[in-house]
Structures are given as C-alpha cells and as structure tokens.
C-alpha cells in the first residue's frame, strides 16, 4: 500500500480515502485532511465523512476545487449514495 493511502475506520472495509492535496510552491503535497467546506461542497455531512473514514482538518477554512473533485470521484468509485 502506498504511503499516502489510509484505511477506512470501518473494521471490515478495505477502501482507501483520497489524500487531500495542498499546493505548495510548484508542487503538490499530502495534507492532513479535507476542510469542512470541501466536505459540504461534495454533499456530505461531517458524520457521514467520518463514517466513511475521510480525515477532516477542522483548522482549515479554505475550499479547493481539486480536493472537492477528488472527493466526488472517490464517492463515485465506492458507489456511495446519499441516504
């Protein structure tokens, strides 16, 4: 498993969450978690994101479009449907 993949908090799940990206100078680096506005923009609540094993960085207030797109792509890959 590559170093940036994180296992879900579910005991039986083997799905990995997408790493949040942060642009730093000319390159991207792995972040600590997705911001609350990014999670809301993707159509999830905080509780749903935690249930899926998505890391949340409560300190960040920014909303980056590439993180929202990566989260939506991840939700599509695992077949998540809002209940």
Image: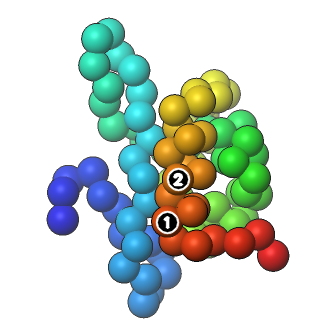
Determine which of the numbered discs, if any, sits on residue 60 in the image: none
Tally of numbered discs: 2
Q: Residues within 10 Å of mark 2 (few under 14, many from 20)?
A: some
Q: Quadrant of residue 46?
A: bottom right
- SS label for mark 2: helix
| Residue at x-position 31% and y-position 30% | 29
Quarter location, residue 6: bottom left
Are there few (<14), some (14-19), or many (20+) residues within 10 Å of tag 1?
Answer: few
* Residue 5: % across, % down: 30, 58
Q: Is residue 7 above or below residue 33?
A: below
Q: Is residue 37 above or below residue 4?
A: above
Q: Position of residue 72 (x, y in %)?
A: 59, 51
Give the residue furthest to the bottom.
12
Identify the residue shown where x is 52% and y is 53%.
73
In the rendered structure, are the residues bearing label 1 and label 2 in contact, judged by CB atoms less than 8 Å apart? yes
Q: Is residue 52 visible?
A: yes
Report the side of 26 relative to 83 (left or right): left
Residue at image coords 63%, 71%: 80
Q: CA distance from mark 1 to mark 2?
A: 6 Å
Report the residue that reaches farthest toward the right: 83
- Which residue is under mark 1? 77
Question: x%, y% of residue 65?
Answer: 59, 30
Residue 57 shows in the view: no
Q: Is residue 51 above or below residue 67?
A: below
Identify residue for label 2.
73
Q: Nearer the viewer, residue 23 or 78?
A: 78
* Element marked by disc 1: helix
């Amino acid at each position: 498993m590559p170093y940036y993949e994180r296992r879900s908090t579910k005991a039986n799940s083997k799905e990995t969450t997408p790493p949040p990206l942060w642009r730093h100078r000319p390159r991207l680096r792995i972040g600590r978690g997705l911001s609350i506005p990014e999670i809301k923009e993707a159509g999830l609540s905080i509780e749903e994101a935690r249930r899926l094993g998505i890391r949340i960085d409560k300190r960040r207030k920014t909303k980056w479009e590439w993180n929202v797109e990566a989260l939506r792509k991840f939700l599509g890959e695992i077949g998540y449907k809002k209940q």
